């Protein structure tokens, strides 16, 4: 078995490590030179539009998957004509654009924040009247970790954001004063076998995921999240791992974003679940049976952002597991993660406090 991966960052790295254990060969294609996956698998430097080169790199693969939805769709269309792509090209196309994603969710009666398509300053004036301040202006594509978005508190800020972002397709979202954020990670194979991981409670800082805790026990929300995920998976005849991020507001869920791939809020599954999200993604796209998604313990996953860490201090925390992606430290860049595991709730709280004191930001 051999799998081609579009992109060679940390998600590809963790997919490749998992593939290695399963006896699956991997090969990545990435236009960037600095690639975290390079330490653990073959990485070819090629432009996503260079179909000839991609065909050469992916020669002999059984299927192709991707670690990011921020891919040039026309180029990937050509790739999908040559190789079996999971999740498929239509799914990638819906979820790489915040507008088509929200339109799709609403067509399935899955609630989202109120939003408006923005094509002109006139649309922004309309939003100012329709939504009271604050609201968010976001680029429809290529936004991640809070990039490509601005919180707007008044007309001046709206004008500045329009000057900075106009020229790119945009969307306006009403600001939701949510109670908390959760995500659900699911896996589905081509036989329609479907599994869900327990809910994850997520905390962001400056738009970047900071801490994920799982399982988050809330029967009502879990049932609702699974129901929404099932509708999407079935509708799209989905194959692979899929993540939905939700805002929880007054006991209801608003879908914020869908990732058609393994997700940062699922890194805890490496040590904290019976089968990791990476292994289940591989199993799903190959057509193997899915592994159990049950949690083995309580887990808390911290992203290690921007700075090198004092590893020995972090590993002094009982039940700590350290992952480093071998990337150059840079402000706001995800460089690694730390997962804490224990079966004792009080111990988890104490260990989280220790980690917060020790992690360098
Ligand atoms: P996004 O890139 O859309 O996932 O946004 C990153 C983070 O910014 C989210 O996880 C939220 O914490 C916050 N955020 C994004 N959109 C909204 C919104 N419409 N209302 C409130 N907070 C938001």
Image: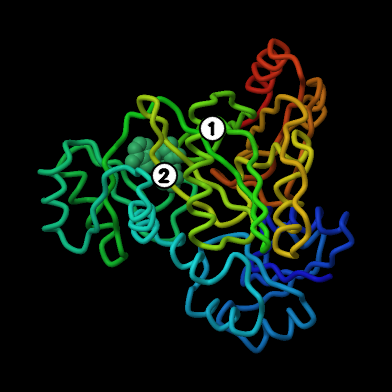
- Horizontal arrangement in the rendering, residue 64 relative to residue 317 (left or right): left
Whole-percent x and y of residue 310?
A: 76, 31
User: Which image quarter holds the N terminus?
Assistant: bottom right
**Element type at marker 1?**
helix
Whole-percent x and y of residue 118?
A: 22, 59
Residue topped by disc 2: 256
Indicate how the structure is coloured in the image.
rainbow
Q: Are there few (<14), some (14-19), or many (20+) residues within 10 Å of tag 1?
A: many
Residue topped by disc 1: 222
**Residue drawn 64% across the image and 58% down it:** 192
User: Which image quarter holds the C terminus?
Assistant: top right
CA–CA distance between discs 2 and 1? 16 Å
Considering only vertical position in the picture, is 354 above or below 114? above
**Residue drawn 35% across the image and 48% down it:** 109
Q: Quadrant of residue 7?
A: bottom right
Front tag of 2 and 1:
1
Ligand 1, what quadrant? top left
**Badge 2 residue CB within 8 Å of ligand 1:** yes
Q: Are there few (<14), some (14-19), or many (20+) residues within 10 Å of tag 2?
A: many
- Horizontal arrangement in the rendering, residue 303 relative to residue 206 (left or right): right
Considering only vertical position in the picture, is 124 above or below 96? above
Q: Give the numbered dot on residue 309.
A: none
**Residue drawn 63% across the image and 22% down it:** 356
């Amino acid at each position: 078995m051999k799998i081609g991966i579009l992109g060679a960052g940390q998600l590809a790295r963790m997919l490749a490590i998992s593939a290695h254990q399963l006896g699956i060969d991997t090969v990545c294609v990435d236009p960037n030179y600095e690639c975290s996956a390079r330490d653990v698998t073959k990485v070819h430097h090629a432009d996503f539009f260079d179909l000839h080169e991609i065909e050469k790199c992916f020669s002999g693969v059984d299927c192709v998957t991707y670690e990011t939805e921020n891919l040039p769709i026309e180029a990937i269309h050509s790739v999908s004509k040559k190789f079996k792509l999971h999740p498929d090209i239509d799914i990638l196309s819906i979820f790489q654009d915040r507008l088509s994603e929200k339109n799709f969710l609403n067509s399935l009666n899955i609630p989202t924040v109120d939003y408006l398509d923005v094509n002109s300053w006139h649309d922004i004036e309309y939003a100012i009247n329709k939504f009271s301040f604050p609201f968010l202006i976001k680029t429809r594509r290529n936004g991640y970790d809070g990039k490509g978005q601005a919180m707007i508190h008044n007309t001046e800020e709206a004008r500045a954001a329009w000057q900075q972002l106009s020229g790119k397709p945009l969307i306006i979202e009403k600001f939701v004063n949510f109670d908390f954020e959760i995500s659900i990670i699911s896996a589905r194979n081509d036989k329609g076998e479907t599994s869900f991981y327990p809910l994850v409670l997520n905390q962001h800082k400056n738009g970047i995921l900071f801490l994920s805790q799982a399982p988050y026990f809330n029967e009502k929300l879990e049932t609702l999240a699974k129901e929404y995920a099932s509708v999407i998976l079935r509708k799209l005849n989905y194959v692979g791992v899929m993540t939905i991020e939700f805002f929880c507001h007054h006991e209801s869920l608003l879908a914020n974003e869908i990732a058609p791939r393994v997700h940062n809020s699922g890194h805890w599954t490496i040590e904290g679940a019976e089968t990791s999200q990476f292994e289940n993604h591989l199993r799903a796209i190959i057509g193997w049976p899915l592994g159990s998604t049950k949690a083995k313990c309580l887990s808390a996953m911290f992203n290690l952002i921007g700075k090198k860490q004092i590893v020995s201090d972090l590993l002094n925390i009982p039940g700590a597991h350290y992952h480093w992606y071998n990337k150059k430290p840079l402000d706001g860049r995800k460089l690694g993660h730390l997962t804490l595991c224990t079966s004792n709730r009080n111990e988890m709280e104490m260990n989280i406090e220790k980690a917060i004191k020790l992690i360098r930001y």
